[in-house]
Image (spheres, rainbow, N blue to C red):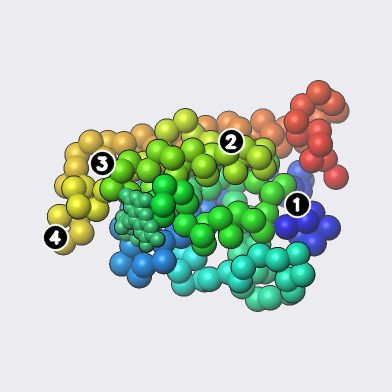
């Protein structure tokens, strides 16, 4: 979304001691999605690590396909845009669709770019094949918007990691969820604080320099 249409980074709207705000984005087009369910669990852990959380489920809040001529006064677009501007860090959850992210997630990303700068991203992929190509492709899109990605993600396989009652039975996955939630909050805060400091400083050889108003 062009910066003239939507508010981009406002360097003065947050104090350094405020809680990190983490937005989880679920993008499976299934009501009973394991990926979105895992996202909810991870957001709970993120909260335990001292962050504020919100969830955007694109299955329930479907954005129209992005187009340069779209009417940005659309209620859903405004709602989603407010959430994106609220967030300091993101967890993007997607099913593996043909080795790539879901169309709904790519469409969500297409609405924004400068809003992602200086923010930290973590990825969850629901796949039968680990979803490594999926996460690599999301990482590429986020890098293009000057967002920072955690070096590892969460891969879930519903047939192995969950029992018949949809409870996680893979202990390794539980451990990985715990470190993922912890690392997202710790590194998200470090990167966000530094980015805000750079926005407010006179330093000109930082990438934040390009985002000053
Ligand atoms: C269009 C489409 C393409 C898919 N492609 C793959 C694929 O390439 N590899 C794979 O492991 N699963 C693939 N799947 C299966 C889903 O990734 C898998 O069922 C996933 O666990 C669903 O996640 P969810 O429970 O969050 O919806 C595909 C499913 C759909 C609908």
Gap in angstroms between the C-alphas marked 2 and 4: 36 Å
Residue 18 x, y percent position in the rendering: 60, 44
Q: Earlier in the sequence, mark 3 or mark 4?
A: 4
The label on residue 8 is 1
Q: Mark 1 or 4, which is nearer the eye?
A: 4
Q: Is mark 1 on a helix, strand or loop?
A: loop
Crowd tier of the residue under label 3, counting other residues whose Cα lies within 10 Å: few below 14, some 14–19, many 20 or above: some
Q: Ligand 1 closer than 8 Å to the CB at disc 4?
A: no
Q: In this view, does 176 lie above or below 9?
A: above
Contact between marks 1 and 4 (CB within 8 A): the answer is: no
Say which quarter of the image contains residue 112.
bottom right
Identify the residue position indicated by label 2 in the image: 148
Question: What residue is at 83 percent from the left and 58 percent from the top?
Answer: 4
* Ligand 1 in which quarter: bottom left
Identify the residue position indicated by label 3 in the image: 174
The label on residue 164 is 4
């Amino acid at each position: 979304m062009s910066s003239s249409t939507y508010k981009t980074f406002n360097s003065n709207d947050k104090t350094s001691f405020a809680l990190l705000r983490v937005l989880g984005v679920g993008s499976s087009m299934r009501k009973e999605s394991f990926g979105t369910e895992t996202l909810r669990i991870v957001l709970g852990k993120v909260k335990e690590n001292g962050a504020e959380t919100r969830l955007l489920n694109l299955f329930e809040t479907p954005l129209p396909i992005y187009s340069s001529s779209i009417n940005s006064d659309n209620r859903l677009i405004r709602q989603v845009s407010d959430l994106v501007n609220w967030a300091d860090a993101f967890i993007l959850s997607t099913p593996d669709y043909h080795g790539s992210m879901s169309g709904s997630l790519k469409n969500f990303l297409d609405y924004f770019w400068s809003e992602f700068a200086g923010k930290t991203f973590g990825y969850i992929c629901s796949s039968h094949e680990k979803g490594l190509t999926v996460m690599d492709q999301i990482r590429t899109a986020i890098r293009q918007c000057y967002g920072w990605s955690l070096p590892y993600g969460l891969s879930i396989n519903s047939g192995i990691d969950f029992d018949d009652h949809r409870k996680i039975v893979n202990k390794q996955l539980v451990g990985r969820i715990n470190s993922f939630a912890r690392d997202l909050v710790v590194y998200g805060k470090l990167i966000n604080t530094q980015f805000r400091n750079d926005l407010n400083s006179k330093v000109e050889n930082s990438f934040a320099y390009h985002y000053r108003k």
